[in-house]
Image (tube, rainbow, N blue to C red):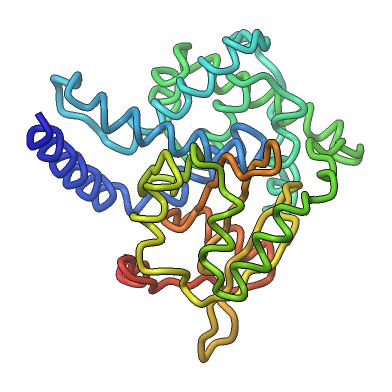
Amino acid sequence: MFQTTKTLQEQSNEIRQRLDEEICDFSEPLWNYCRYLTGSPWDGEDLYQETLLKVLGGLYTRWHPTNLKSYIFRIATNTWIDLCRKEKRTLGVLSEENEAFEELSDNLELEEALQQLDELFTPRQTAVFLLLEVFRFHGNEIASIVKTTPGAVYASVRRMKRKIQNTKHQSIKSKYTASPQRSKIIQAYLKAFNHGDLEGMLSLISDQAHYEASLGFLEVSKEEIRNGSLAFGLPGHHAIECELWGKRVIVVLAESDQGQLVHDIQYQEVENNKIVYHRSFFFRKEFIVAASKELGYKPQLIKPPLNWEEK
């Protein structure tokens, strides 16, 4: 049984690597789509990951030739709409009523509009706007993705542009609020990390802690962490605490001849004075690149086993 499981893991990893190669040309647009669709880089990252996992698990159901880009954007859209439906959000109706056409005047105005979509429109309207105006899908493709008609796609976007024009000077309330002051446990974690104190850091982690390196690996106990991702000790980098998109995070910086580069971004959840959940974005190129820009650093593109400069 163990040998069979191991073989399946190896085969799954090969398929995952093949998928990464196939989508490399549009993985960044997909991440941005998820970000603006959800109205949050954090929620968008979760949607991006869930989308890829669903694609990996569902491609076998496609019996016909498949446009992979269109298929993956469809999965992302449907996954988000399903989540909104579970949260009992109004999904919206896309009607074909005629409205006057309104053009957004420039790229800056479009960028402002992207920041407002989640505040102003329903999930289906947001998806339609992004797919047509930003990612340049054809009306019939969009109609298939969101389950409507091409006429409704174009009419909805026309109405949305009018509403954006009418509200563009209004202040849109931020979705995020400042986090409470970080726990003393996190400060102790930073101190241990920066002093290379592996045992001190492990003492702060629950025996049942989950360590998730998104789209990389998952460890479900301190013992797995000790013998797995930390088997060779700490990396010798420097970690600082920052606020990123409304969340307090730990940014791991690597020294280079270009200065400090973002090696990893992490956050932890603490209960009963122990770290019970640790999440790392080490393997997430699109997230690391966008976060580095937000934080004012350059990303580390070559960090074994990853070489993002090749893609």
Q: Position of residue 234 (x, y in %)?
A: 47, 69
Q: Left or right: where does residue 86 sit relative to residue 56? A: right
Residue 161 in which image quadrant: top right
Front-most of residues 184 and 148? 184
Q: Residue at the location (70% across, 32% down)?
A: 117
User: Residue at point 68% right, 61% down?
Assistant: 294
Would you place residue 311 above or below residue 99 in this image? Answer: below
- Name the foreground residue: 119 vs 218: 218
Q: Residue at x 66, y 39 (%)?
A: 40
Which residue is more in the foreground, 26 or 306?
306
The C terminus lies in quadrant = bottom left
For this view, does 261 lie left or right of residue 216? right
Rendered-image quadrant of the N terminus = top left
Q: Position of residue 96 (x, y in %)?
A: 59, 10
Residue sticking out furthest to the right: 170
Q: Is residue 202 left or right of residue 8?
A: right
Residue at 76% across, 26% down: 120
Where does the image place residue 13, in percent across and percent down from the top left?
21, 45
Q: Hey, which quadrant is residue 180 in on the image? A: top right
| Residue 215 in the image, given as x and y percentages of width and height | 38, 45
Q: Residue furthest bottom?
A: 257
Q: State whether residue 250 is above or below residue 135.
A: below
How many marks do you count on the picture?
0
